[in-house]
Image (spheres, rainbow, N blue to C red):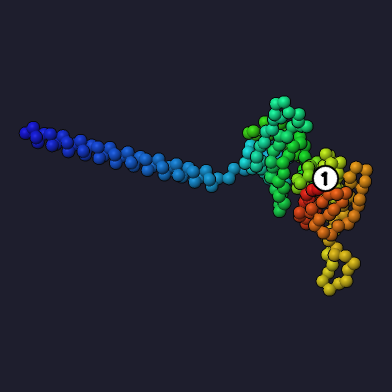
Amino acid sequence: MKKLITIMLIVIIIIFLGVFFYLLNNNKDETVNQNTNVNKNTFNETTVKQVSLDQEFIIKENDLVQINDQDLQIEVKKFHRWECPEFVSCSGDQSHIVFELKQKNKTFTDKIYFDTFFVFSYRIDRIEADYKTYAKLKVTKTQAPYSYYGRLNDPAYIVENQKFAINSENFSVKLLKLHNSPCLEGAMCLWAGVGYDLEISKDQQTETKNYLTGSVNAFGYNIEILDTDYESYILLEVSK
């Protein structure tokens, strides 16, 4: 009799453990499936922050901001906080923000060191930033082209009558005019009809010419025209 009771108890315990582990495994599978669905949904969602012109807004790394009614998108690729090492003499703060701006078929990526910069006929003011997690910006529409300040080897978009200046070099390039009247097929033309007029200045010297090629040399500098539609802008890069 005792043996029978012992056997029954063992069977009951085995059944109980089997049910317990079965329920435990089912709960784990449900949790994994829920987490997988959450990850999939998170991956598929694209969060775009909508803001208006003249409105201050906070942007964080990898945030995408759409300027309403302007077809202009701004994304912060990276923050870089720089601090001068102790006992070292530094010329200035090198903290900067790496931006990517898109408008229609144009993309502009650059390191922004200044409180104000101009691109695509917009003025972007950096109100504040910790250069680690966020920046507060404001975008306004410019009424006239302003000078764009940059550095050697930094690509820059400029439009007609806008100047790209490198203060450290006392050097500037101004886009005076774009030409887009290509010679018709079969016609005899004095020139190709597409190009750009540049005013290039170094110290007190100025040179103004019409250029047709993608590379310009003046005052010991190379001006590479990386892109242009010959109607509204050029993308240039200045190097030595």
Mark 1: secondary structure? strand
Q: Quadrant of the N terminus?
A: top left
Residue 207 in sight in this render: yes
Percent x, y of residue 195 = 84, 58
Residue that badge 1 annotates? 164
Residue drawn at x 71%, y 29% as measured from the top left? 84
Residue drawn at x 64%, y 33% as measured from the top left? 132
Residue 196 vertical placement versus 60 (above, below): below
Residue drawn at x 23%, y 37% as measured from the top left? 16
Q: Is residue 1 left or right of residue 194?
A: left
Residue 130 vertical placement versus 218 (above, below): above
Q: Residue furthest front?
A: 87
Residue drawn at x 70%, y 29% as measured from the top left? 85
Residue 212 vertical placement versus 206 (above, below): below
Q: Residue furthest bottom?
A: 186
Percent x, y of residue 118 = 78, 42
Q: Residue furthest top?
A: 87
Percent x, y of residue 151 = 78, 42
Front residue of 175/38: it is 175
Q: Quadrant of residue 76?
A: top right
Q: Say few, some or many: other residues with alpha carbon within 10 Å of mark 1 (under 14 / 14 to 19 / 20 or more).
A: many
Number of numbered discs overlaid on the protein picture: 1
Q: Quadrant of residue 188?
A: bottom right
Q: Quadrant of residue 183?
A: bottom right
Residue 71 in sight in this render: no
Q: Amino acid at mark 1?
A: Phe
